[in-house]
């Protein structure tokens, strides 16, 4: 599975299509999204502090070089209670963000960075300036390596991508309805990459090294069947069949009590492998 940015309903795609892109920002400017939203210049965070400026910047950075409709911005900033002159208010916030770029010396011509283009606005910055771009690239390379059986390379690439995360995405931004959805989607992508990296480490035979990490994860996510299946596998392959059986029983009890369902195929397959290991040992 390739990890890509989603586009909200009504948004349009890249402004000019794929091409080599030189933006108007200072060459040292970088943007962090995988943790606090930061505008990093020479090691210093120069992000705006006003809540709505942060919301607008986050929304635009999650869709670099894509037009974000004014209606989407209004929905993010004010939800279902927009001001009477919402579009004029958006224009004011756009102007203030441009002024911020100029005042901080990040761009000589901020109108070339934050551009007005129907039906809204686009942040004309190279996506490679963001940690999210590096995360996506690492995910693609890691998944390709895993699919081709290069498990050592896959594990290294995926762990490097994981290590770009410094906490929940855009953690210092008060999210509206649009950014709340984006944050959930980003966290799901983080979870998927962690799962793929653990699979790669299992294929590398690093079962004992994974027990502690997976044990902590299942405690934090008691309904995540994928994590439980991975823990059952590594415990079984470490010779800890009784512990693995206990993980399975506890998960089944929680699922039946809280959701009224039995464990799914992923857990069932791990349990079947566990029984096979037990039969082999006998």
Image (tube, rainbow, N blue to C red):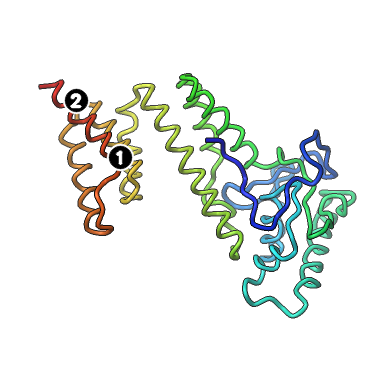
17 vs 33, left or right, is: right
Q: Which residue is mark 2?
A: 277
Residue 171 coordinates in the image, percent (x, y): 56, 56
In this view, 3 is above or below 182: above
Using the rendered view, name the quadrant where residue 17 is placed: top right
Residue at left 26%, top 59%?
Answer: 258
Give the left or right position of residue 152, taking residue 269 as reference.
right
Q: What residue sits 46% from the left and 43% below the top?
A: 191
Left or right of 173, for residue 24: right
How far, Cα to Cα, is label 1 from label 2? 18 Å
Q: Quadrant of the C terminus?
A: top left
Residue farthest along the bottom direction in this orientation: 84
Q: Secondary structure at mark 1?
A: helix
Residue linked to disc 1: 265
Q: Position of residue 77 (x, y in %)?
A: 67, 68
Label whose residue precedes the other's in the sequence (1 or 2): 1
Question: In the displayed structure, would residue 249 be above or below residue 256?
Answer: above
Mark 2: give few (<14), some (14-19) or many (20+) Cα within 10 Å. Answer: some
Q: Quadrant of residue 43?
A: top right
Instruction: Please provide percent x and percent y for residue 95.
Output: 83, 63
At a point 13% along the width and 24% down the height, the residue shown is 279
The label nearer to you, 1 versus 2, is: 1
Q: Is residue 222 left or right of residue 248?
A: right
Where residue 205 appears, x then y in whole percent?
Answer: 34, 22
Q: What is the secondary structure assignment of the residue under circle 2?
A: helix
Q: Residues within 10 Å of mark 1 (few under 14, many from 20)?
A: few
């Amino acid at each position: 599975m390739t990890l890509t940015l989603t586009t909200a309903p009504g948004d349009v795609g890249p402004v000019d299509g794929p091409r080599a892109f030189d933006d108007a920002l200072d060459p040292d400017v970088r943007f962090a999204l995988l943790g606090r939203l930061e505008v990093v210049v020479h090691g210093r965070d120069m992000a705006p502090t006003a809540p709505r400026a942060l919301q607008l910047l986050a929304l635009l950075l999650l869709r670099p070089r894509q037009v974000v409709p004014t209606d989407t911005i209004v929905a993010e900033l004010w939800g279902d209670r927009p001001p009477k002159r919402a579009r004029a208010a958006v224009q004011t916030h756009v102007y203030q963000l441009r002024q911020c770029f100029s005042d901080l010396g990040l761009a000589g011509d901020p109108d070339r960075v934050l551009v007005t283009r129907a039906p809204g606005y686009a942040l004309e910055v190279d996506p490679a300036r963001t940690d999210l771009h590096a995360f996506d690239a690492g995910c693609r390379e890691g998944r390709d390596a895993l699919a081709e059986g290069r498990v050592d390379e896959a594990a290294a690439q995926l762990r490097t991508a994981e290590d770009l995360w410094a906490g929940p995405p855009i953690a210092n931004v008060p999210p509206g309805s649009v950014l709340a959805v984006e944050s959930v989607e980003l966290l799901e992508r983080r979870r998927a990459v962690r799962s793929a990296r653990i699979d790669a480490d299992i294929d590398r035979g690093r079962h004992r090294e994974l027990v502690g990490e997976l044990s902590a994860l299942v405690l934090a996510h008691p309904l995540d069947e994928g994590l439980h299946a991975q823990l059952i596998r590594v415990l079984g392959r470490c010779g800890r069949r009784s512990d693995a059986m206990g993980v399975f029983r506890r998960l089944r009890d929680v699922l039946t009590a809280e959701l009224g369902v039995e464990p799914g195929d992923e857990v069932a397959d791990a349990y079947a492998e566990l029984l096979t290991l037990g039969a082999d040992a006998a």
